[in-house]
Image (spheres, rainbow, N blue to C red):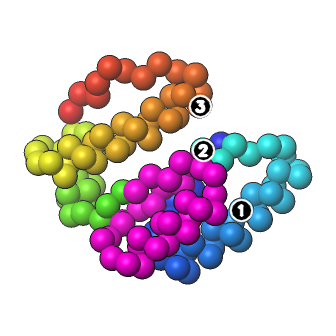
């Protein structure tokens, strides 16, 4: 199973094509590789990122998650905690938690596990 992280810039989107070919060559030796999703990380609100994400969505039949670039995530990592344990409360942190729970739900569905009702901070 593979989750493919990418920063949505043109060069990285082109690298996805190379990566897809490498995965296909690995499948010849190891069998099917389940591609679960593409996670666009550090997404900024600019034309390059929007256009690249649209290209990725049209080129791959996978769920595409968009994690916005934000200092809250960097701060939580700097404090040595996940976004779920980060003490700062605001809408952006809540949005990040919701997005990460959505990605976790995809994993739970893929691996036939039941997701917990709510993640404790």
Query: Does residue 80 sit above or below 85 in this rendering?
Result: below
Query: Does residue 58 sit above or below 84 in this rendering?
Result: below
Q: Is residue 83 visible?
A: no
First along the sequence among labels 2 and 1? 1
Residue 118, given in percent of the width and then of the height, sits at 29, 24
Q: At 65% across and 47% down in the image, what residue appears?
A: 35
Let me know if residue 106 is in the magenta part: no
Q: At 71% across and 62% down in the image, what residue appears?
A: 20
Q: Is residue 103 left or right of residue 110?
A: left
Determine which residue is flagged by label 1.
20
Determine which residue is flagged by label 3.
110
- Identify the secondary structure beneath mark 3: helix
Magenta part of the chain? 37-66
Q: How many marks?
A: 3
Q: Nearer the viewer, residue 42 or 54?
A: 54
What's the mark number on residue 36?
A: 2
Q: Nearer the viewer, residue 95 or 78?
A: 95
Q: At 28% across and 42% down in the image, what residue appears?
A: 97
Within 10 Å of disc 2 (Cα), the crowding (few <14, some 14-19, many 20+) is: some
CB under 8 Å between discs 2 and 3: yes
Residue 79, given in percent of the width and then of the height, sits at 20, 53
Within 10 Å of disc 1 (Cα), the crowding (few <14, some 14-19, many 20+) is: some
């Amino acid at each position: 199973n593979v989750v493919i992280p990418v920063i949505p810039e043109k060069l990285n989107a082109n690298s996805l094509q190379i990566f897809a070919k490498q995965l296909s060559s690995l499948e010849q030796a190891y069998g099917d590789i389940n591609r679960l999703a593409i996670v666009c990380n550090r997404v900024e609100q600019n034309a390059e990122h929007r256009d690249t994400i649209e290209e990725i969505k049209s080129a791959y039949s996978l769920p595409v998650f968009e994690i916005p670039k934000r200092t809250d995530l960097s701060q939580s990592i700097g404090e040595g905690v996940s976004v779920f344990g980060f003490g700062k409360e605001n809408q952006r942190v809540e949005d990040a938690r919701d997005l990460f729970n959505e990605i976790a739900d995809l994993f739970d569905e893929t691996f036939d596990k039941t997701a917990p009702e709510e993640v404790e901070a």
